[in-house]
Amino acid sequence: VEGIEVVAVNDLTDDEMLAHLLKYDTMQGRFTGEVEVIDGGFRVNGKEVKSYEEPDASKLPWGDLDIDVVLECTGFYTDKEKAEAHINAGAKKVLISAPAKGDVKTIVFNTNHNDLDGSETVVSGASCTTNSLAPVAKVLSDEFGLVEGLMTTIHAYTGDQMTQDGPHKKGDKRRARAAA
């Protein structure tokens, strides 16, 4: 993407597996560019990307790397206090890729992105369902007035679902059933 430079990733998975998953993505298809594992990370189309396997975000070298925005996609830092571990590590901003808990602005582009005033250090990008519904609901509301609504979502499997029957980590009996 023009204007965006991926500087580093932090994932508890090793670099060989990360490179493989980038190259061979089931949903996006095979990446046609070059992916090469190197010492301390990998190279994508000639651009070096540093890699870390740090479970504690406050210990990441974001300040040394001059990180502008961290995309927080682990699911572990979903409230402002936890996400600020990235700020304390030197990042300037954090975008949580899930619904956040507590006092965090939730932003859906082309719906309410103008609510950002620049002072925010941590924001939520909402959920995939919200990103699908909100733009349509906004158009309906703006053009016709929307008093209430009901939606049904058909969702692909998520990493939180069992692919075969077994105990669910949160004790959710419905999610303990096989996804298929």
Image: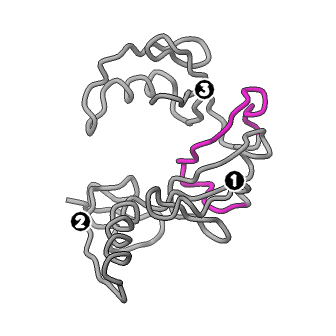
- In the rendered view, would you say 45 is above or below 180? above
- In the rendered view, would you say 87 is above or below 124? above
Identify the disc placed on residue 118.
Answer: 1
- In the rendered view, would you say 13 is above or below 129? above
Q: Are marks 3 and 2 in contact (CB under 8 Å)?
A: no
Task: Specify the quadrant that holds the N terminus.
Answer: top left
Q: Is residue 127 left or right of residue 133?
A: right
- Is-magenta flag for residue 40? no
Q: Nearer the viewer, residue 119 or 176?
A: 119
Instruction: Answer few, some or many: residues within 10 Å of disc 2's Cα (few below 14, many 20 plus, some between 14 and 19).
Output: few
Q: CA distance from mark 3 to mark 1?
A: 22 Å
Identify the disc placed on residue 38.
Answer: none
Asked which quadrant contains residue 69, the reply is top right
- Is-magenta flag for residue 73? yes
Tell me which numbered mark, 3 or 1, is placed earlier along the sequence. Answer: 3
- The residue that disc 3 covers is 7
Mark 2 secondary-structure assignment: loop
Mark 1 secondary-structure assignment: loop
Identify the disc placed on residue 154.
Answer: 2
Mark 3 secondary-structure assignment: loop
Asked which quadrant contains residue 12, the reply is top right
| Coordinates of residue 20 in the picture (x, y in percent) | 38, 24
Q: Which residues are magenta?
A: 59-80
Q: Nearer the viewer, residue 168 or 81?
A: 81
Instruction: Answer few, some or many: residues within 10 Å of disc 3's Cα (few below 14, many 20 plus, some between 14 and 19).
Output: some
Amino acid tagged 2: Ile
| Coordinates of residue 152 in the picture (x, y in percent) | 25, 74
- Residue plotted at (26% across, 25% down): 30
Amino acid tagged 3: Val
Q: How is the image coloured?
A: one colour
Q: CA distance from mark 2 to mark 1?
A: 35 Å
